[in-house]
Amino acid sequence: MLKKIYTLPPTPIGLDWALTYPIEIKNLGITKLKYQIDTTALETLNTNNYDFRIFEIQNPEGTLAPSDTQYIYILFRPLEAKEYSVDLAIKISDIEGPSPQSHSLKLRGEGYHPHEENKPKEERFYGDLPKCRAFIGEEGQMAAFSLETIDFGELESGKICNRFVMLYNMHPTQKLKYDFQKSGLMCGDNLKLEPMAGELEPNSHQNIKMSLIPSRFPTHFEGEIQCSVEWENQGGEDKEELKSMHTNTNVNENQELLFLRLKKRTKFVKEENPVETREGETLFTNVLNEIMHEILHDEEMDALLDNCKENKGGILSQIVTSNLKPPSTEDLYFDLARPEKKDMNAIHEQQVYTDNLKELTGHNDEDILRKTCFMDKQFSGMLEYMLEDTIFNLIEEATYQEFDLTTNPKIYIRKDQTDRK
């Protein structure tokens, strides 16, 4: 591994999906290795944090071929605005058996509230590492990139970011072949290189376009991608070896390796509340108002009221376990309060109001009468029964963790609605 302690970038709490962070692991030997991460301490940390999955590891074990480079994918989803730390032992074994040396993966992460103006400062990943894994031989460095580090910045999901880098062949007489190697560094994001491979004549350069397309899942990564360079004589004679950069003794003698360091962070966008708030209204009152609004403007509710004269069964008789008679729409049209003779002035004022309302909205008498039913005590009582049971069930399910309150609700489209479109 490149570092002894990995400090993940500060991550906001309340994420819908855990943040994915890759950690490079490389086999520097000449035999195949197996690794296995002991996750006991990780499970203990999660248990002590209300059984919430603060840290997870997608691939806690695997196999590395000689000179092979892979990535361990860490999932981080902070529950509270605080620092988290865990040290995990790694068991390494080869053809001769378990390694006598001890290895460990030390993870550090910090959660912060997304509404904080000043988020915690990120620790530099390469702060204690050399700037370039390079060795310049007698011939000097004859192939190089115009930039060694490319920062894609903070990107939203699906937002494409383009960068350019130039590959130079500075040798006066020999051409080279280059080929970018596939890498798991991007951990789900899509990185396109154009061109991915090709040839360069002496004293020439190639413009390489880099397009990064972030996935829908949040990812932070910082590491290197490898470009293999092979030199050859222009006249087809025996290949002459030029080594301007080496990383280990297992590199093919006909190859030279160049590296590009890439960095990318996910931009966490604050989602606006889909429910429009009103001044002086609490969140609970706002939710109830929106629920009532959806009920009163629902086509099925209008159809129910239109057919209530023929269908007189108790609406809640099968779902309310009570000895009391459930509310019903049976008498909504007939049991409304009748005004007395002395209230004729009030009746006249009501008629004027109704006439003005019909002219303004375009509704007829039957529409006005149906809307008036919403103010009936029996109807409001029926809604109270429905809402009371619904809210109670939601709270009950959330208490037993049958669904996640922090996840955005799904929107279901019925088949009959799609047919209308």
Image: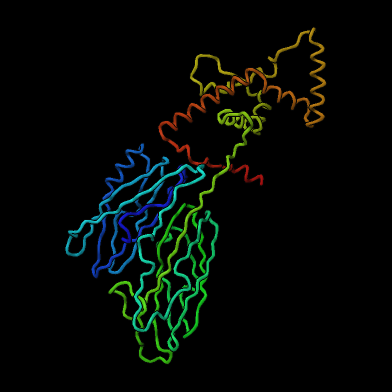
Q: Quadrant of residue 292?
A: top right
Residue 383 is situated, as x and y percent measured from the top left of the image, at 59, 24
Number of marks: 0
Q: Where's the N terminus, which quadrant?
A: bottom left
Q: Please, is residue 259 above or below residue 34 in the view? A: below
Residue 360 is situated, as x and y percent measured from the top left of the image, at 80, 30
- Looking at the image, which residue is at 79% across and 23% down? 354
Residue 283 is situated, as x and y percent measured from the top left of the image, at 56, 31
- Looking at the image, which residue is at 42% across and 41% down? 81
- Looking at the image, which residue is at 41% across and 44% down? 78
Residue 237 is situated, as x and y percent measured from the top left of the image, at 38, 92
Q: Is residue 403 left or right of residue 162?
A: left
Q: Please, is residue 321 above or below residue 202 in the view? A: above
Residue in the foreground of this view, choosing between 228 and 350: 228
Q: Is residue 215 something one can see in this rendering?
A: yes
Q: Please, is residue 315 above or below residue 71 in the view? A: above
Q: Please, is residue 112 above or below residue 95 in the view? A: above
Residue in the foreground of this view, choosing between 299 and 137: 137
- Looking at the image, which residue is at 37% across and 79% down? 244
Q: Is residue 331 left or right of residue 172?
A: right
Q: Quadrant of residue 382?
A: top right
Q: Is residue 98 something one can see in this rendering?
A: no
Q: How is the image coloured?
A: rainbow
Residue in the foreground of this view, choosing between 303 and 38: 38
